[in-house]
Amino acid sequence: MWSSCARPRHPWLSGWVLVWLVGATVTFAGEPRNEPVLPIPTCTAMDGEKVRLGKRLYHDVRLSANNAMSCATCHPLDGWGMDGIPLSTRVDGVSNTLNTPTVFNALFNIGQFWNGRVTSLEDQIEESVRVEMGSNWNDVLRKVAQDDAYRQSFARVYRGGVQAVNIRDAIAEFERSLITPNSRFDRYLRGDDQAITPLERQGYELFKKLGCVSCHQGVNLGGNLFHRSGVFTTLETGEPPGDAREQDRMAVTGASEDARVFKVPTLRNVTRTAPYFHHGDVATLEEAVMLMARGQLGRGISVAERDLLIGFLGTLEGALYGECR
Ligand code: HEC
Ligand code: HEC
């Protein structure tokens, strides 16, 4: 879709044509732009009471086997929705083999987890409670139902009261409220020319020209397609952790062409979500961008180009939470 929107470049474009174009841009300032990247809605209208209930559950350690770990342990909301370490440790002491993705804007992804093995947030919660937090619904229900405040809230919000399906529904509703709208780039997309600097705009043009946008596009600049990690050269800087290889898209589809294929990660707030890649062993955005150019596009880029790209990526930093909260 996006390629049909790209503005044609003509070498003869100069002089009066340019003056006319500049005039047109000024005339139309304030119009939304037709771009391969889309702004995050400023508010995802949610059921407020469910969101509050889901927020409490999200932070509740009683969802884990040892009453010591909540969703927020690995996805802290004041830490841009992720833990900032290469690999987290599950409740049973086993190390995860994949880096923790952010929960912010996860609702816009085509599927959840690096290989997209579940499509709904409800199913993702099912797995997180079982695997990351080592618990089961009998135990969770017992602990939640012992709490008077929970029992009252559930009775108000759900006909069936405290039930596993309702717990998943409330947490998923809360997750759907976790958006980061109004980044400077989104304001630019909505027609505010002054929202980004000329250099940042150059960074965006380069992002499109090099072809980063062919994989990182849509609302999340990612999250809407699967692609091989390391098309031209590997993105791994060291020895890949054990079974990370078995958690690629091939584990879901069984198709050999899906080996080393992962969901393209979002670039929203990416300046805040180091370390990078599914293995989490790339500590800086500088290195991640260089590896992307070489690994996914098969070309080197200069340090100046890298910095232009990073300048653009910085404009994707949004406000935590939408305006409707
Ligand atoms: C021990 C750390 C840990 C805990 C606790 C944890 N997660 Fe995660 N979460 C991860 C890891 C690691 C992944 C990536 C796993 C994968 O892709 O296979 C992940 C993936 C996700 C994703 C998918 C994001 C995406 O872009 O694919 C969401 C959403 C999420 N978790 C939400 C939750 C919720 C809600 C809870 C609580 C019910 C929770 N997590 C508990 C570590 C954790
Ligand atoms: C062919 C598809 C493709 C292209 C082109 C591409 N990327 Fe990526 N990008 C990916 C995939 C897939 C990953 C995840 C790789 C992994 O984890 O092993 C990724 C990961 C990233 C990450 C790390 C995000 C995170 O949270 O871990 C950054 C930053 C990034 N890309 C930026 C860029 C930039 C800048 C360009 C252009 C120079 C680019 N990408 C071009 C597919 C692509």
Image (cartoon, rainbow, N blue to C red):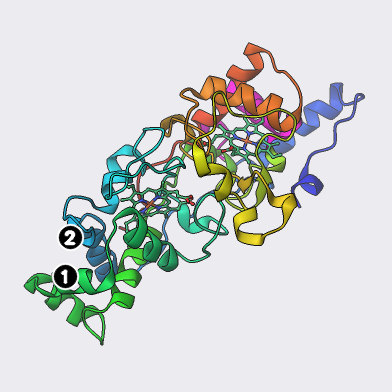
Is 143 rendered above or below residue 158?
A: above
Which residue corresponds to mark 1? 144
**Left or right: 313 in relation to 35:** left
Q: Would you say residue 47 is visible in this rendering?
A: no
Which residue is depicted at the point 74% across and 48% down? 2
Label 1 environment density (alpha carbons within 10 Å; few <14, some 14–19, many ≥20): many
Tags 2 and 1 in contact by the CB under 8 Å rule? yes
Instruction: Identify the main secondary structure in magenta.
Output: helix
Of residues 157 and 133, the one drawn nearer to the viewer in this rendering? 133
Where on the picture, by quarter, is residue 174? bottom left
Q: Is residue 117 above or below residue 219?
A: below
Q: Nearer the viewer, residue 40 or 247?
A: 247
Asked whether 198 falls inside the magenta stretch, the response is yes
**The magenta stretch spans which residues?**
192-212
Which structural element holds mark 2? Answer: helix
Count of residue discs = 2
